[in-house]
Image: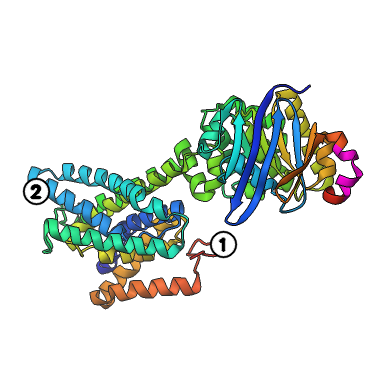
């Protein structure tokens, strides 16, 4: 079941010079739910996430995390408010070991060995590779590492940018299942950006379709998935 | 044979000083992708401060400590006031700012302390050891030089490898944006990186000052040697900086002893150019290309 609104975005816009990448986007993400943001390349999905987490400056609008306006707060402070962002390309630091990458996620709050151990239980593959450089991990392992690292910051809201990118279909399906479980079992509010609309909608509660920075559809995931027009025009399946 | 031993030991001792300068350059390069051409001038300032403290209090070790502390402070101030504004900009901006700082510091030092080089005391005796009736040039002060540089290098290595602060500093240097998303205070890490680097630099200044004297331009050559050692070691690797420093120290010592002391600077430039042509990634390069 979905709970209270964790993240509320109102009329958010982001400009890169004369180009408006995000154009008046309004959405909300509830506790224990997955909201999928879909759309073609260049639709503004990544820019939307980067603006929410403070990596890009918003030119208009608001982003509210549990009642607190977070726009204008430094990136490194937003994570302290309970929002974790797994960036495009996973953001694994390849020159550091798997364990060093993991530990980084919890350093700011002084996370102890127990929470590290919990991540190894969630992702046993990472334990085997704990001393190896993260650059030697496979795509799926890197995705687990970046998600595990984000979880170590004990977030309430999780932003995920294209977690299935470059993964084999079976691995991608596992990651999607994991995301669903994180939302349901840990009561996380997940904002999931995906190109692979079909698999994202299969685990999402809500589907939002972006086109050239604007929201063109916002509905229950099943409704979006069943909409022939949307699928043909924007989702490609 | 004694001559060979003398030259080898001398090479290790001077190489340790180059290693300290190289370490300073490498740490700043890793943290902010800037080659700090002002490092020579920064260590000149801290050595002048040591000279003043020693002159007025008579205590070498007080001057030593004050110089290291002012190195930390100067590094942090330079990063906060100057470098923070140009981070992420074109590399040439950083070069120009560093050169500007170099000129500013040298001019300021001349105005404050005068342009005539002054002598600087060594920490320990510079009278060589007598081993089995043979008089060596290697002296207690050289032992101190080698040990203190290696101790500082090892300490910094432990800091980077074994502490939470070190992990955050490495993450900030390797992937600033990801580090920020993980809550690392990247700006603070850069400031600390510059502070530790200038600390290593100020140590080099104290160690080399007895032989080059203290003056506004006396440390220009040490920067060239340190830069060569850093490039030799790969510019990205603190361990490489140490090895590069010692290797360069040995090469220059042999050149100076067997050929001519006047060829030393030329030999350093030959080494620099040779490395850049043959192994631009340094002696320890893996596969990644230099981005400069």
Please state the horizontal and vertical placement of residue B152, each as a whole percent of the image: 34, 46
Would residue A131 be visible to someone looking at this image? no
- Dot 2 or dot 1: first in sequence order is 2
Badge 1 marks a residue whose secondary structure is loop
Q: What is the crowding at mark 2: few (fewer than 14 residues within 10 Å), some, or many (at least 20)?
A: few
Q: Which residue is drawn at 34% across and 60% down?
A: B98
Task: Return the residue at label 1.
Answer: B288
The chain ID associated with circle 1 is B
The residues bearing labels 2 and 1 have C-alpha atoms spaced at a distance of: 48 Å
Per the rendered image, the range of residues in magenta is: A224-232
Q: Mark 2 points at which residue?
A: B55
Residue located at (55% from left, 65% from top): B289
Using the image, determine if residue B87 lies above or below residue A197: below
Q: Does the magenta stretch include residue B280?
A: no
Across and down, in percent, residue A16 comes to 59, 54
Residue B177 shown left or right of residue B2 in the figure: right
Residue at x-position 65% and y-position 39%:
A11
Relative to B244, say whether B147 is above or below: above
Would residue A228 be counted in the magenta stretch? yes
Q: Which of B232 and A210 is in front in this view?
A: A210
Which residue occupies the foreground of this view, A164 or A32?
A32
Q: Give the quarter of the figure containing the N terminus of chain B.
A: bottom left
Q: Is residue B78 visible?
A: yes
């Amino acid at each position: 079941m979905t709970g209270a609104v964790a993240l509320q975005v109102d009329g958010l816009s982001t400009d890169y010079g004369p180009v408006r990448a995000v154009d008046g986007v309004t959405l909300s993400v509830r506790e224990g739910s997955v909201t999928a943001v879909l759309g073609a390349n260049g639709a503004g999905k990544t820019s939307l996430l980067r603006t929410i987490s403070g990596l890009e400056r918003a030119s208009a609008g608001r982003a509210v995390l549990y009642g607190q306006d977070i726009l204008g707060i430094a990136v490194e402070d937003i994570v302290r408010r309970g929002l974790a962002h797994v960036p495009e390309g996973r953001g694994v630091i390849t020159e550091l070991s798997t364990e060093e990458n993991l530990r980084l996620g919890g350093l700011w709050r002084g996370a102890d060995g127990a929470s590290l151990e919990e991540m190894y239980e969630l992702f046993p593959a990472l334990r085997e590779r704990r001393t190896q450089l993260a650059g030697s991990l496979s795509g799926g392992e890197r995705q687990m590492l970046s998600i595990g690292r984000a979880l170590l910051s004990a977030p309430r809201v999780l932003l995920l940018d294209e977690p299935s990118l470059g993964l084999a279909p079976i691995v991608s399906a596992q990651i999607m299942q994991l995301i669903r479980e994180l939302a349901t079992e840990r009561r996380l509010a997940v904002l999931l950006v995906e190109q692979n609309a079909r698999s994202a909608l299969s685990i999402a509660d809500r589907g939002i379709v972006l086109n050239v920075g604007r929201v063109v559809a916002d509905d229950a995931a099943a409704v979006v998935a069943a909409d022939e027009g949307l699928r043909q025009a924007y989702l490609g399946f | 044979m004694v001559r060979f031993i003398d030259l080898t030991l001398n090479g290790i001792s001077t190489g340790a000083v180059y290693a300290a300068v190289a370490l300073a350059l490498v740490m700043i390069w890793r943290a902010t992708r800037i080659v700090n051409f002002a490092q020579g001038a920064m260590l000149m300032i801290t050595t002048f401060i040591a000279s003043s403290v020693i002159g007025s209090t008579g205590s070498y070790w007080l001057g030593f400590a004050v110089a290291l502390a002012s190195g930390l402070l100067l590094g942090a101030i330079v990063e906060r006031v100057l470098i923070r504004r140009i981070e992420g900009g074109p590399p040439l901006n950083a070069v120009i700012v560093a050169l500007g700082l170099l000129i500013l510091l040298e001019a300021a030092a001349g105005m404050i302390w005068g342009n005539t080089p002054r002598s600087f005391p060594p920490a320990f005796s510079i009278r060589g050891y007598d081993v089995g009736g043979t008089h060596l040039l290697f002296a207690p002060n050289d032992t101190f030089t080698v040990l203190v540089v290696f101790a500082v290098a090892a300490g910094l290595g432990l800091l980077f490898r074994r502490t939470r602060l070190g992990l955050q500093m490495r993450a900030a240097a390797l992937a600033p944006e990801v580090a920020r998303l993980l809550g690392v205070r990247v700006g603070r890490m850069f400031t600390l990186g510059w502070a530790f680097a200038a600390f290593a630099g100020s140590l080099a200044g104290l160690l080399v000052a007895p032989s080059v004297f203290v003056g506004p331009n006396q440390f220009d050559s040490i920067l060239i040697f340190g830069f060569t050692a850093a490039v030799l070691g790969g510019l990205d690797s603190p361990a490489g900086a140490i090895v590069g420093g010692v290797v360069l120290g040995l090469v220059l010592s042999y050149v100076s002893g067997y050929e001519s002391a006047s060829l030393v600077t030329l030999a350093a430039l030959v080494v620099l150019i040779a490395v850049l042509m043959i192994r631009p990634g340094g002696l320890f390069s893996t596969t990644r290309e230099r981005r400069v």
